[in-house]
Image (tube, grey):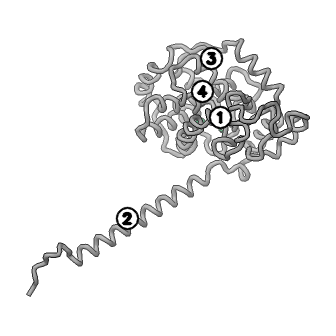
Amino acid sequence: MQLPDNSGFDATSDAVDEVNILKGKLWDQAASLDAEKDKSKFRQYDDACERVKSFYKEQHEKQTMEFNIKMRVNMRKTVRARMGVWEAMELLNTLVDESDPDTQLTQIEHLLQTAEAIRRDGKPEWMQVTGLVHDLGKLLHIFGSEGQWDVVGDTFVVGCAFSEKIVLHESFVGNPDSKDAVYSTPYGIYQPHCGLENVMLSWGHDEYLYHILKEQSTLPEEGLAMIRYHSFYPWHREGAYTHLTNADDEKALAAVRAFNPYDLYSKSDAPVDAAALKPYYERLIKRYFNDVIEW
Ligand SMILES: O[C@H]1[C@H](O)[C@@H](O)[C@H](O)[C@@H](O)[C@H]1O
Ligand SMILES: [Fe+2]
Ligand SMILES: [Fe+2]
Protein backbone atom coordinates (compact mmCIF):
# COMPACT_ATOMS: atom_id res chain seq x y z
CA MET A 1 0.00 0.00 0.00
CA GLN A 2 1.25 3.45 -0.83
CA LEU A 3 0.62 6.34 1.49
CA PRO A 4 -0.39 9.62 -0.12
CA ASP A 5 2.58 11.93 -0.17
CA ASN A 6 1.54 15.31 1.21
CA SER A 7 5.03 16.57 1.80
CA GLY A 8 5.56 17.41 -1.88
CA PHE A 9 8.83 15.58 -1.50
CA ASP A 10 9.49 12.81 -4.01
CA ALA A 11 12.65 11.20 -2.73
CA THR A 12 13.76 9.64 -6.03
CA SER A 13 13.16 12.56 -8.36
CA ASP A 14 14.56 15.09 -5.87
CA ALA A 15 17.73 13.03 -5.56
CA VAL A 16 18.02 12.95 -9.36
CA ASP A 17 17.52 16.73 -9.49
CA GLU A 18 20.17 17.23 -6.90
CA VAL A 19 22.64 15.10 -8.82
CA ASN A 20 21.88 17.09 -11.96
CA ILE A 21 22.40 20.40 -10.16
CA LEU A 22 25.73 19.15 -8.86
CA LYS A 23 26.71 17.97 -12.33
CA GLY A 24 25.80 21.39 -13.70
CA LYS A 25 27.93 23.10 -11.10
CA LEU A 26 30.85 20.85 -11.93
CA TRP A 27 30.44 21.65 -15.61
CA ASP A 28 30.40 25.38 -14.90
CA GLN A 29 33.48 25.03 -12.78
CA ALA A 30 35.29 23.03 -15.43
CA ALA A 31 34.30 25.53 -18.10
CA SER A 32 35.50 28.49 -16.07
CA LEU A 33 38.74 26.70 -15.28
CA ASP A 34 39.17 26.15 -18.99
CA ALA A 35 38.48 29.77 -19.73
CA GLU A 36 41.04 30.73 -17.06
CA LYS A 37 43.56 28.46 -18.63
CA ASP A 38 43.00 29.97 -22.02
CA LYS A 39 43.32 33.49 -20.70
CA SER A 40 46.58 32.66 -19.01
CA LYS A 41 48.03 31.79 -22.38
CA PHE A 42 47.78 35.36 -23.65
CA ARG A 43 50.61 37.91 -23.37
CA GLN A 44 53.35 35.44 -22.53
CA TYR A 45 56.33 37.65 -23.31
CA ASP A 46 59.03 35.66 -21.61
CA ASP A 47 58.25 32.68 -23.84
CA ALA A 48 57.48 34.78 -26.90
CA CYS A 49 59.16 34.22 -30.25
CA GLU A 50 62.23 36.17 -31.43
CA ARG A 51 60.07 38.46 -33.58
CA VAL A 52 58.30 39.80 -30.47
CA LYS A 53 61.41 39.98 -28.30
CA SER A 54 63.48 41.84 -30.82
CA PHE A 55 60.54 44.17 -31.47
CA TYR A 56 60.45 45.21 -27.81
CA LYS A 57 64.22 45.52 -27.58
CA GLU A 58 64.20 47.99 -30.44
CA GLN A 59 61.17 49.86 -29.12
CA HIS A 60 62.56 50.18 -25.61
CA GLU A 61 65.87 51.48 -26.87
CA LYS A 62 64.44 54.03 -29.28
CA GLN A 63 61.39 55.52 -27.54
CA THR A 64 63.07 58.55 -25.99
CA MET A 65 61.72 61.86 -24.79
CA GLU A 66 63.41 63.61 -27.70
CA PHE A 67 61.73 61.33 -30.25
CA ASN A 68 58.38 61.76 -28.52
CA ILE A 69 58.48 65.56 -28.72
CA LYS A 70 59.45 65.39 -32.38
CA MET A 71 56.46 63.15 -33.19
CA ARG A 72 53.98 65.31 -31.30
CA VAL A 73 55.08 68.43 -33.12
CA ASN A 74 54.96 66.55 -36.40
CA MET A 75 51.46 65.21 -35.67
CA ARG A 76 49.97 68.67 -35.68
CA LYS A 77 51.32 69.89 -38.97
CA THR A 78 50.58 67.02 -41.34
CA VAL A 79 47.54 65.52 -43.04
CA ARG A 80 48.71 62.09 -44.19
CA ALA A 81 45.64 60.96 -46.11
CA ARG A 82 41.93 61.63 -46.57
CA MET A 83 39.61 58.61 -46.39
CA GLY A 84 36.66 57.03 -44.59
CA VAL A 85 36.81 54.50 -41.76
CA TRP A 86 36.06 51.33 -43.74
CA GLU A 87 38.59 52.27 -46.39
CA ALA A 88 41.15 52.82 -43.62
CA MET A 89 40.40 49.36 -42.23
CA GLU A 90 41.02 47.82 -45.62
CA LEU A 91 44.23 49.76 -46.11
CA LEU A 92 45.54 48.64 -42.73
CA ASN A 93 45.08 45.06 -43.72
CA THR A 94 48.59 44.72 -45.11
CA LEU A 95 50.13 45.12 -41.65
CA VAL A 96 51.06 42.14 -39.48
CA ASP A 97 51.83 43.38 -35.99
CA GLU A 98 55.34 42.31 -34.91
CA SER A 99 54.70 43.05 -31.25
CA ASP A 100 51.80 40.69 -30.84
CA PRO A 101 52.42 37.21 -29.46
CA ASP A 102 48.73 36.28 -29.68
CA THR A 103 47.61 36.82 -33.22
CA GLN A 104 48.97 36.79 -36.73
CA LEU A 105 45.56 37.69 -38.10
CA THR A 106 45.15 40.71 -40.28
CA GLN A 107 44.06 43.92 -38.64
CA ILE A 108 40.61 44.08 -40.23
CA GLU A 109 39.88 40.71 -38.64
CA HIS A 110 41.13 41.85 -35.27
CA LEU A 111 39.02 45.01 -35.46
CA LEU A 112 35.88 43.13 -36.46
CA GLN A 113 36.45 40.41 -33.86
CA THR A 114 36.79 43.06 -31.16
CA ALA A 115 33.65 44.89 -32.29
CA GLU A 116 31.67 41.68 -32.65
CA ALA A 117 32.63 40.50 -29.15
CA ILE A 118 31.42 43.83 -27.75
CA ARG A 119 28.21 43.62 -29.77
CA ARG A 120 27.58 40.01 -28.67
CA ASP A 121 27.65 41.17 -25.06
CA GLY A 122 24.97 43.75 -25.78
CA LYS A 123 27.24 46.75 -25.16
CA PRO A 124 26.28 50.17 -26.57
CA GLU A 125 26.89 51.14 -30.18
CA TRP A 126 29.54 53.72 -29.32
CA MET A 127 31.58 50.97 -27.68
CA GLN A 128 31.12 48.61 -30.63
CA VAL A 129 32.36 51.29 -32.97
CA THR A 130 35.26 52.09 -30.62
CA GLY A 131 36.25 48.43 -30.86
CA LEU A 132 35.97 48.67 -34.62
CA VAL A 133 38.42 51.55 -34.93
CA HIS A 134 40.68 51.21 -31.88
CA ASP A 135 43.77 50.04 -33.80
CA LEU A 136 43.39 52.22 -36.90
CA GLY A 137 46.27 54.32 -35.57
CA LYS A 138 48.50 51.57 -36.90
CA LEU A 139 48.02 53.27 -40.26
CA LEU A 140 51.00 55.33 -39.15
CA HIS A 141 53.11 52.43 -40.36
CA ILE A 142 51.62 52.66 -43.84
CA PHE A 143 52.02 56.44 -43.87
CA GLY A 144 55.76 55.95 -43.33
CA SER A 145 56.80 55.54 -39.69
CA GLU A 146 60.40 54.74 -38.83
CA GLY A 147 59.46 51.12 -38.17
CA GLN A 148 56.90 49.22 -36.13
CA TRP A 149 58.59 50.22 -32.87
CA ASP A 150 57.00 53.68 -33.11
CA VAL A 151 53.53 52.33 -33.97
CA VAL A 152 52.55 49.14 -32.13
CA GLY A 153 53.22 47.40 -28.81
CA ASP A 154 52.45 48.30 -25.22
CA THR A 155 52.90 51.92 -24.17
CA PHE A 156 54.60 53.46 -21.13
CA VAL A 157 55.50 56.88 -19.78
CA VAL A 158 58.54 58.75 -21.10
CA GLY A 159 60.17 61.57 -19.14
CA CYS A 160 60.44 59.58 -15.90
CA ALA A 161 61.92 56.23 -14.87
CA PHE A 162 60.76 53.28 -16.99
CA SER A 163 58.52 51.09 -14.85
CA GLU A 164 59.53 47.54 -14.05
CA LYS A 165 55.95 46.57 -14.82
CA ILE A 166 56.57 47.08 -18.55
CA VAL A 167 56.97 43.80 -20.44
CA LEU A 168 60.59 42.87 -21.20
CA HIS A 169 61.70 46.00 -19.35
CA GLU A 170 65.35 44.84 -19.13
CA SER A 171 65.89 46.25 -22.61
CA PHE A 172 65.53 49.83 -21.36
CA VAL A 173 69.21 49.77 -20.37
CA GLY A 174 69.87 50.57 -24.01
CA ASN A 175 67.66 53.69 -23.90
CA PRO A 176 69.69 56.87 -23.33
CA ASP A 177 66.87 58.30 -21.14
CA SER A 178 67.51 55.59 -18.57
CA LYS A 179 70.83 57.34 -17.84
CA ASP A 180 69.48 60.89 -17.91
CA ALA A 181 69.73 62.77 -14.61
CA VAL A 182 66.05 63.83 -14.71
CA TYR A 183 64.27 61.26 -16.90
CA SER A 184 65.62 58.35 -14.85
CA THR A 185 64.04 59.50 -11.57
CA PRO A 186 60.64 58.27 -10.35
CA TYR A 187 58.87 61.59 -11.09
CA GLY A 188 61.18 62.82 -13.84
CA ILE A 189 59.67 65.95 -15.40
CA TYR A 190 56.30 65.42 -13.70
CA GLN A 191 54.60 66.66 -10.53
CA PRO A 192 53.13 64.07 -8.14
CA HIS A 193 49.60 63.11 -9.27
CA CYS A 194 49.65 65.49 -12.23
CA GLY A 195 47.17 63.23 -14.06
CA LEU A 196 47.63 61.24 -17.26
CA GLU A 197 46.35 64.21 -19.22
CA ASN A 198 49.72 65.83 -18.48
CA VAL A 199 51.90 62.80 -19.01
CA MET A 200 53.69 61.86 -22.23
CA LEU A 201 53.05 58.28 -23.26
CA SER A 202 55.40 56.54 -25.65
CA TRP A 203 54.54 57.39 -29.25
CA GLY A 204 52.37 54.97 -31.21
CA HIS A 205 48.96 54.05 -32.60
CA ASP A 206 46.97 54.89 -29.44
CA GLU A 207 48.14 58.44 -29.04
CA TYR A 208 47.94 59.20 -32.73
CA LEU A 209 44.39 57.88 -33.18
CA TYR A 210 43.22 59.60 -30.03
CA HIS A 211 44.31 62.97 -31.41
CA ILE A 212 42.63 62.32 -34.75
CA LEU A 213 39.31 61.15 -33.31
CA LYS A 214 39.11 63.70 -30.52
CA GLU A 215 38.66 66.24 -33.31
CA GLN A 216 36.87 64.13 -35.90
CA SER A 217 34.33 61.91 -34.18
CA THR A 218 31.43 62.07 -31.79
CA LEU A 219 32.74 59.24 -29.60
CA PRO A 220 32.12 59.83 -25.89
CA GLU A 221 34.95 60.47 -23.47
CA GLU A 222 35.04 56.80 -22.42
CA GLY A 223 35.47 55.69 -26.03
CA LEU A 224 38.37 58.12 -26.47
CA ALA A 225 39.94 56.84 -23.24
CA MET A 226 39.66 53.26 -24.50
CA ILE A 227 41.55 54.32 -27.61
CA ARG A 228 44.18 56.40 -25.87
CA TYR A 229 45.09 53.91 -23.15
CA HIS A 230 44.31 50.48 -24.52
CA SER A 231 48.01 49.59 -24.93
CA PHE A 232 48.98 51.11 -21.60
CA TYR A 233 49.11 47.71 -19.88
CA PRO A 234 51.65 48.79 -17.24
CA TRP A 235 48.91 51.08 -15.92
CA HIS A 236 45.58 49.40 -16.68
CA ARG A 237 46.69 45.86 -15.93
CA GLU A 238 49.76 46.11 -13.70
CA GLY A 239 48.82 49.15 -11.62
CA ALA A 240 52.02 51.11 -12.31
CA TYR A 241 52.29 54.92 -12.33
CA THR A 242 49.87 55.57 -9.47
CA HIS A 243 52.31 58.29 -8.32
CA LEU A 244 51.38 60.24 -11.46
CA THR A 245 47.64 59.61 -11.81
CA ASN A 246 44.85 61.56 -10.13
CA ALA A 247 41.11 61.22 -9.50
CA ASP A 248 40.25 62.22 -13.08
CA ASP A 249 41.95 59.07 -14.34
CA GLU A 250 39.63 56.73 -12.44
CA LYS A 251 36.86 56.96 -15.00
CA ALA A 252 39.30 56.34 -17.83
CA LEU A 253 40.72 53.33 -16.00
CA ALA A 254 37.28 51.79 -15.58
CA ALA A 255 36.55 52.34 -19.28
CA VAL A 256 39.85 50.81 -20.43
CA ARG A 257 39.44 47.83 -18.16
CA ALA A 258 35.94 47.22 -19.52
CA PHE A 259 37.31 47.36 -23.04
CA ASN A 260 40.45 45.27 -22.60
CA PRO A 261 38.97 41.74 -22.55
CA TYR A 262 37.29 42.36 -25.91
CA ASP A 263 40.53 43.57 -27.45
CA LEU A 264 42.69 40.80 -26.02
CA TYR A 265 40.61 37.66 -25.77
CA SER A 266 38.66 38.05 -29.00
CA LYS A 267 41.94 37.18 -30.75
CA SER A 268 41.05 33.52 -30.36
CA ASP A 269 37.45 33.86 -31.60
CA ALA A 270 36.17 32.25 -34.78
CA PRO A 271 37.05 34.08 -38.02
CA VAL A 272 34.68 36.82 -39.16
CA ASP A 273 33.08 37.46 -42.52
CA ALA A 274 34.03 41.05 -43.28
CA ALA A 275 31.77 41.41 -46.33
CA ALA A 276 28.72 40.16 -44.42
CA LEU A 277 29.37 42.51 -41.50
CA LYS A 278 30.09 45.57 -43.59
CA PRO A 279 26.51 46.92 -43.92
CA TYR A 280 25.94 46.78 -40.14
CA TYR A 281 29.16 48.61 -39.33
CA GLU A 282 28.84 51.11 -42.18
CA ARG A 283 25.63 52.27 -40.50
CA LEU A 284 27.44 52.73 -37.18
CA ILE A 285 30.39 54.45 -38.85
CA LYS A 286 28.02 57.03 -40.40
CA ARG A 287 26.66 57.80 -36.96
CA TYR A 288 29.99 58.57 -35.30
CA PHE A 289 32.40 59.76 -38.00
CA ASN A 290 32.57 62.11 -40.95
CA ASP A 291 32.47 60.39 -44.33
CA VAL A 292 36.04 61.45 -44.89
CA ILE A 293 38.61 61.69 -42.12
CA GLU A 294 41.81 63.68 -42.34
CA TRP A 295 44.41 61.23 -41.14
O1 LIG B 1 51.01 43.79 -29.44
C1 LIG B 1 49.88 44.47 -29.09
C2 LIG B 1 49.31 45.26 -30.21
O2 LIG B 1 50.24 46.09 -30.82
C3 LIG B 1 48.10 46.04 -29.78
O3 LIG B 1 47.49 46.75 -30.79
C4 LIG B 1 48.40 46.90 -28.61
O4 LIG B 1 47.27 47.63 -28.29
C5 LIG B 1 48.90 46.08 -27.48
O5 LIG B 1 49.18 46.83 -26.37
C6 LIG B 1 50.10 45.28 -27.86
O6 LIG B 1 50.45 44.46 -26.83
FE1 LIG C 1 46.27 48.35 -30.15
FE1 LIG D 1 43.71 45.72 -30.59
Q: Which residue is mark 1?
A: 96
Q: Earlier in the sequence, mark 4 or mark 3?
A: 4
Q: Which mark is residue 295?
A: 3
Amino acid type, label 4: Leu
Q: Are marks 4 and 3 in contact (CB under 8 Å)?
A: no
Q: Which residue is mark 2?
A: 24
Q: CA distance from mark 4 to mark 3?
A: 10 Å
**Residue closest to the eye, 179 or 27:** 179
Amino acid type, label 2: Gly
Mark 4, secondary structure of its residue: helix
- Side (left or right) of 68 relative to 15: right
Amino acid type, label 1: Val
**Residue closest to the eye, 43 or 239:** 239
Residue furthest toward the bottom? 1
Q: Earlier in the sequence, mark 4 or mark 2?
A: 2
Residue at left 57%, top 41%? 257
